[in-house]
Image (tube, rainbow, N blue to C red):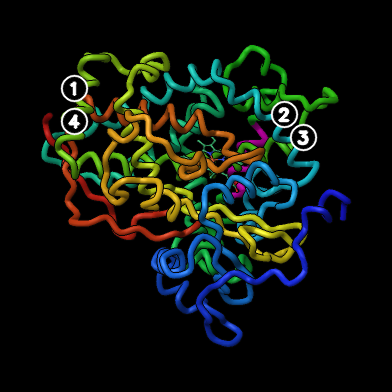
Amino acid sequence: MSTEARQRGPEAGIRRPPGPDGLPVIGNLHRFLRGQLTFIETCAREYGDVVYTNVGPIESYMVAHPEQIERVLVTEDDRFRKAEMGQGRLKPLFGDGLVVSDGEHWRRQRTRMQPAFRPDRIATYAEIMAEQAAAAATAWSPGETIRVDEEMRRITLSILVRSLFGTDLGDREAEIREAFEMVMARFEGVNMWLPGWVPTPANWRFRRGRKRIDEIVFDLIDERRDEAETRDDLLSALLLAEDERGERMSDEAVRDEVVTLLAAGHDTTALALTYALYLVGTSPDVGRKLRAELDAKLGEQVPTLSDVTELEYAEAVVSEALRLYPPTHATAREPVEDVTVDGYRIPADSTVFLPQWIAHRDERWWTDPETFRPDRWLDDANRPEYAYFPFGGGPRHCLGHRFATVEAQVVLATIASRWRLDPEIDDLSVRPVITLRPTEPVAMTVRER
Ligand code: HEM
């Protein structure tokens, strides 16, 4: 342990944080499984900002105060590593991609990949975003009921496939999308909890889908190595990416990052859009204001990157949807040494949850927190920075943050300037399954504006 770490370590006798007692061995696992969100809400209400949550074999703690969240993610990030939890399940797909890697490999890859997400590159992707959203919206007809959650997944996956590999993929575009959907089914419902070796149809489809993705991605890497300089897709940017020693990535590393981007980038943004469209649909006033802004700023045009900076209200709608329904409902870390948080001891190698779900709905930082009110983003409210962190924070903050916010605004603007969508479900209930997913299909009816 470094001298500095020792100095910052806990003093003797510091207490464990309060929390629900739980049963022998399983702790609070039964409560957690019954309803993860209700469980963490109860913990925050009854025990405060630092809670010993004690779930099953994992020694776990919840830290919900923005100042402490900032400490874990940003100011003292060297004392925490990314949590192991759930990473094992993702490894067979992501390999050593950015989301699951750590240490020196992660640092080199992050340095290499950062330039591919620079603002000037996002302009090209914004065209693809508007085109794909317009293609989907044009296919809808008035009176038709659509599954918004499925439609958004289709749109965001097409956007990512085209941004990654270019718009000239031909048949391979549909093939990648199909193979990727086969792979993702492994992370749905009960399949997620079954080990990879269990002979289930989902595991079999996972292996077949992954094999097909690998074949196509390695073929594309082969084709692109020579022409990367002249292309503006993300794959070409990754092929040219260098670390500080001027070294490029191996084919395997590029494959891992490509698949990581596909997985980390499409489901999350699809959820943000699903929630935004649902919330706009439940709030006629917000819908009217949004359409008025789109009419004034866009008219009949599809939005470009420079329009996005003008669409203040659309931006507020997206921020507010991400506040109420953050697709990443909690971020997890493990202390590499014993730490003291708010006067409580949290031991090395335990799991620390930083719950967006709680901080984003905390009455101390948000007036009327359960209400969807995009206008709150247009006032200059004074609140701690980490009361809102849908994209995480610190060195491991979301690499696709800018890509995702531009995408959400462009797709929302393209759809809302054409149609009004009315919810066909009474209530939106959600549950965390890696990401925060709706428990029921989100059906909405397409109406003339
Ligand atoms: C609304 C959409 C999105 C949300 C809410 C979201 C959220 C997050 C969060 C919270 C993290 C940090 C996790 C942690 O600290 O443990 C993260 C990391 C990451 N995200 Fe996103 N994300 C979104 C969209 C995207 C997109 C579009 C891409 C790529 C095209 C992307 C790529 C990544 C990558 C590669 C990482 C890992 C970064 C690293 O560890 O260095 N995300 N995301």
Give percent across and percent down for residue 284.
14, 38
The three-letter code of the residue at mark 3 reads Arg
Q: Residues within 10 Å of mark 2 (few under 14, many from 20)?
A: many
**Label 4 – label 3 distance at C-alpha:** 45 Å
Give the residue drawn at x 72%, y 59%. 339
Give percent across and percent down for residue 70.
59, 45
Label 3: state its secondary structure. helix
Chief secondary structure of the magenta portion: helix
Q: Which mark is residue 108?
A: 3
Give percent across and percent down for residue 223.
67, 25
N-terminal of the pair, mark 1 or mark 2, is 2
Residue contact between numbered discs 2 and 3, judged by CB atoms under 8 Å: yes
Give yes or no for residue 238 being in the magenta stretch: no
Residue wearing tag 2: 112
Give the residue drawn at x 50%, y 55%. 355
**Label 1 – label 2 distance at C-alpha:** 42 Å
Residue contact between numbered discs 4 and 3, judged by CB atoms under 8 Å: no
Give yes or no for residue 211 being in the magenta stretch: yes
Q: Residues within 10 Å of mark 1 (few under 14, many from 20)?
A: some
Residue wearing tag 4: 419
Task: Answer left or right for 16 relative to 272.
Answer: right
**Label 4 – label 1 distance at C-alpha:** 13 Å
- Depth check: give the residue in front, 189 or 245: 245
